[in-house]
Image: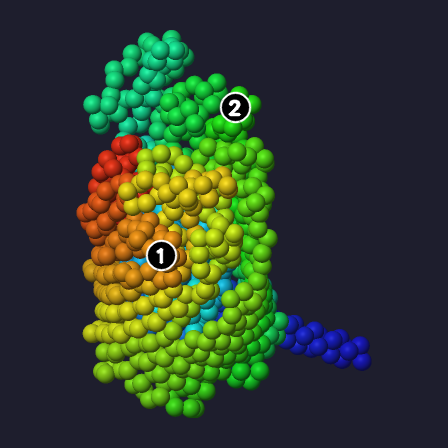
Amino acid sequence: MRKKLKLIITLIFTLSCSLFFAQNHEINGTVTNENGDPLEFATVLIKGSQTSVTTDTSGKFKITSSTNSPSLIVSLLGYIPKEVVARDHFVEVQLFFESNNLDEIVVVGSRNPKKSKLETAVPVDVVNLAKIRNITPQTTTNDILTYLIPSFNSNRQSSADGTEHIDPASLRGLGPDQVLVLINGKRRHTTSLVNYQNTVGNGSVGTDLSAIPASAIKRIEVLRDGAAAQYGSDAIAGVINLVLKDNTGLEANATYGSTSRNDGQTTNLNLNYGTKIGSKGGFINLSGEFNNREKTNRSQNHNLIIFDQSAQGNFFAYDFADDPAQSRQIDDDLLAQNGLKRNDFNFQIGDAKIQNIQGFFNASIPLNEQIEFYTSGGVSHRKGTGYGFRRLPSETENVVASIFPFGFQPELNSVVTDLSSSFGFKFKFGEWKLDLSNTIGQNKFVYEVSNTNNVSLGDASPTKFEAGNHSFLQNTVNADISRLYKEIFNGLNVAFGAEYRFEKYKIVPGEEASYIDGGAQSFPGFSPLNAVDENRNSVGIYADIEADVTEKLLVGVAGRFEEYTDFGNTINGKLSARYKILDNLSVRGAIGSGFRAPSLHQQYFNNIATDVVDGEVLNSGIFRNDSDVAKQLGIPKLKEETSKNYSFGIVYSPTKQLHITADYYHIKIDNRIILTGNLGNDAYGEPVEELRKLFAQYGAETGRFFTNAINTTTNGLDVVIDYDLNLGKGKLNLSLLYNYNDNKVDDQLNNIPSLFVGQEDVYYGPQERSLIETNTPKHKGTFAINYGLDKWNFLLRNTYFGEVTRDGFPFGGIQKHDGKVVTDLTAAYKITRKIQFALGTNNLFDIFPDRQIYENSYFGVFKYAPVQMGTTGAYYFGRLSLTL
């Protein structure tokens, strides 16, 4: 009896162990290509279940099965899927190349979960940032997109207050506020900064792409088509969707670089770590990044001396190296006697110094087979130092001689804090999918101005001022419902939903000394009269239907109703179609209406800023559209911009490795919001006394306003050619990208107040017009060669930035800056499978824009205008990457 009992216990224990191990059968493995290189982001699925994982940067994966010998389906876009039976605890899977990543499934452009970028009715670019960022010379998202998306442009500005610290970016030559940015498909908040320093995007409010660390981004999808009917306000020019990393493993990256002039040194350190959560495909991915960029100086003369001898014994003179007629010989001994050196008088003009610390997270946790929780967000803390115009000692109206006997160059120090968080739940109800989410974000800009004075305070003036701050908060609640009907036509996707958005904009005054009686030179602080605390909310409802009517014909229809508490409501629609003429040749097109509500910033931003008017440094005011001074001048109330978008293109794939797309677009925007010129000066620079007296009541000599003054028309063409082939034992990718973009402002202005009839060139003049029409290249093209061989990877890329024209009216001249070619070259070597080292350069041949003519250069000091590819010149870098 005792033996039988022992046998029964043994059998029960053995069976229990078997069941236990069967439920916890862990399989490890690697996925490689035909050359043995690890494949990242490959999907490993247990056949007959919903359990899946993705491979890390080393091609490794770990998955748990309830059976001892499960069948695994391994797939990766661009490779032939493979099914293997995992009879052991470790498996090796080799995938073979099929096509390039132009077939990648995209989130934007179509809500159909099965559409690749070549199957959508509108053009979509996909940048696999996680794959290319280790070999590209650029480190920030803005810079990377400038060289990879033909119709995307961004360059750094100088002596432009806050715009120096957040680079304005444009798509198809339109404004930064006419591009909608998404993160994981959810709306991203804009900055609190208004660009008002006569740079590209003047008068607009953009989204700070550089607030999201590049190390946190898996890929970037760029929808190059008007999409306001699908995604809401701000999507007139298109949509940029940043898809965050969801991989597991550890990645570390360190980059150091410098310009050819031994300035602008950059240090980038980043860390990304991901791990799975549970056994149903859950994960969390964390990123941390540190960026430090030193200033550059591209002034006409780095050793500008402001030193001459007057009757009172003070020493002031002007030493312009490029203009001998204005130079005077300055004795170094005389400088030394006064405790001075030549470089004490540098005129700093160039890229601002920027330091950025960032952290981001992305997570998904399946709660059961029907419910998934997801969340993402992060923080960015940026400190910047930019420089204003130098105040000469002879400018007694600007300089307190007892504090700065030899003049000074003010410094604008900013602290930019960006916070964001998004969370939601995805539900499955049979074939229906429901996505409920809440996304909140805030951008805050704090100003400090130093190395300056307030003349009205005389000897008692501080030299450092807390100048106030502005902030913008946005909270968006979304409900999205979708279903794919496979049995209707050849597939019918239905999506609809609702959105509630709350926005809040604030301006907080600085200390009294920063704004009183003219305020701090270069950046007068915000005063209590500038204070703003305004908010609004909006409600939107949309429907989006897309049907594969036949195997050859795709048709999409979208509509959206949106209502704002501060300006009313609007209805917009979009019709799109794609027709397959041949198996490898399709045509596509879309027509749609769009809108953009005036931002809270454009409605309420107001300040007193320093500008150069008629060769003088004067205070220019920006006044609210609803202010008393606006009413006195007859400035009309702001209303929404409206647009019509048309596009037509072809998609041609002669082989699986060669893909060609060409898309023409036509965009008409009415009642576009702009910032007027400096009112208070006529076309010849002579002051208008009545206006000057009016503005003087508010501490300014001239004034500007936001108004719906213009209509614009944009015509353009995007061409993308991508070719993959095997060359020897390596792989070669050739890509050709081209954009033609022509922006025109209608000759007739909208609703111009009667007081300015005959003064149109001041109300909205040639300078403001050129910022839209000619300050971004009409032609831009990139030809890139990427070759991978064994442990080596080589990138050679030539980017052509076409001609731009700058108009300095009314006090400068018209100047054409010839087109330029910038060459990037990088070589990367894998020391081990986990460690890679790269050396390379951006702008190999040290190309600069044409030198500015004297009239546009602030007394000859500004050597280069920040146009086309910027004024950095050649940049050399080294990068070490580690993956575990």
Mark 2 sits on what residue? 458
Instruction: Write the residue at 25% across / 37% down.
Output: 855
Q: Is residue 797 left or right of residue 110?
A: left
Q: Residue furthest right?
A: 1
Task: Please determine whether, in this image, residue 97 is positioned above or below residue 357.
Answer: below
Q: Rate crowding at label 1 as few (under 14), some (14 to 19) or many (20 or more) other CA atoms within 10 Å.
A: many
**Label 2 sits on what residue type?**
Gly
Label 1, secondary structure: give it: strand
Residue at (57, 45) in percent of width and height: 529
The residue depicted at 58 percent of the width and 59 percent of the height is 535
- Relative to 460, is 309 on the left or the right? left
Q: Quadrant of residue 427?
A: bottom right
- Of the image marks 1 and 2, the number of the one nearer the N terminus: 1
Instruction: Quickly name the residue at label 1.
Output: 170
Q: Position of residue 620 (x, y in %)?
A: 43, 42
Which residue is at the front of the view, 860 or 631? Answer: 631
Residue 818, percent across and down?
Answer: 19, 47
Q: Secondary structure at mark 2?
A: helix
Res 783 seen here: yes
For badge 1, the amino acid type reads Ser
Name the spot of residue 169 as percent of width and height, x first.
37, 54
Q: Nearer the viewer, residue 142 or 321?
A: 321
Q: What quarter of the picture does the N terminus occupy? A: bottom right
Disc 1 versus disc 2: nearer the observer = 2
Crowding around mark 2 (Cα neighbors within 10 Å: few <14, some 14 to 19, many 20+) is some
Q: Which mark is residue 866?
A: none
